Amino acid sequence: MTIYLPLMLNMGHINELLHETLSDLVNFSVVMLEFMGLIVVVYTGLNAFRKWVKKDLHTRLYLAEGLAMALSFKLGGEILRTVVVRDMSEIMQVGAIIVLRAALTLLIHWEIKNEEKEIKSNKHSDT
């Protein structure tokens, strides 16, 4: 029995080390996904502004699609964050953020469909 005691004590230390490593990896990945979402928002916003200045009719569609993509990156980060959540208050907070971002994504996709219908109807009325 004395042979196994040091091994059992080390298992607790190894478990904590693995958890900290996983936590660090998840936190890094979340920050990277959030950063990618930020880059998509800025890039899309600048290009949409350029298209708006040129009076491109597809500007709203382009902007909505870019925002939907950025929200997908950010939603992925929030889902990944659930891996290291330890207590119920954190679960509730992350869950609320996920629900909010998912609702925004659905709203943007609805806007994209409406904008595509409007573009199609404008093409048909022009002919």
Image (cartoon, rainbow, N blue to C red):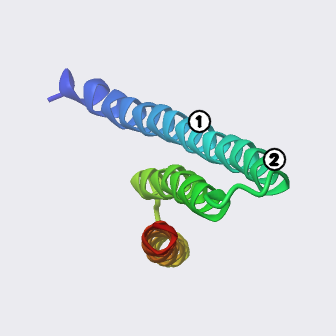
The residue lying furthest to the right in this view is 53
Q: Residue at x 81, y 47 (%)?
A: 50
Tell which of 106 and 123 is nearer to you. 123
The amino acid pointed to by label 2 is Arg
Is any part of residue 74 visible from this angle?
yes
Measured in 3D between alpha carbons, the distance from the residue under mark 1 to the one under mark 2, in whole angstroms, is: 33 Å
Q: Which residue is drawn at 47% across and 66% down?
A: 123
Is label 2 in a helix, a strand or a loop? helix
Q: Work out whether residue 43 or residue 122 is closer to the camera in this orientation and state it.
A: 122
Image x and y of residue 78, in percent = 50, 58
In the drawing, does residue 120 fall left or right of residue 96?
A: left
Q: Looking at numbered disc 1 in the image, what kind of residue is underneath it?
A: Phe
Could you tell me residue 68's position as x and y percent? 52, 59
Q: Residue at x 40, y 32 (%)?
A: 18
Disc 1 target residue = 28
Secondary structure beneath dot 1 equals helix
At 60% across and 54% down in the image, what residue appears? Answer: 62
- To which residue does mark 2 refer? 50
Where does residue 117 sit, x and y in percent of width and height?
A: 43, 74
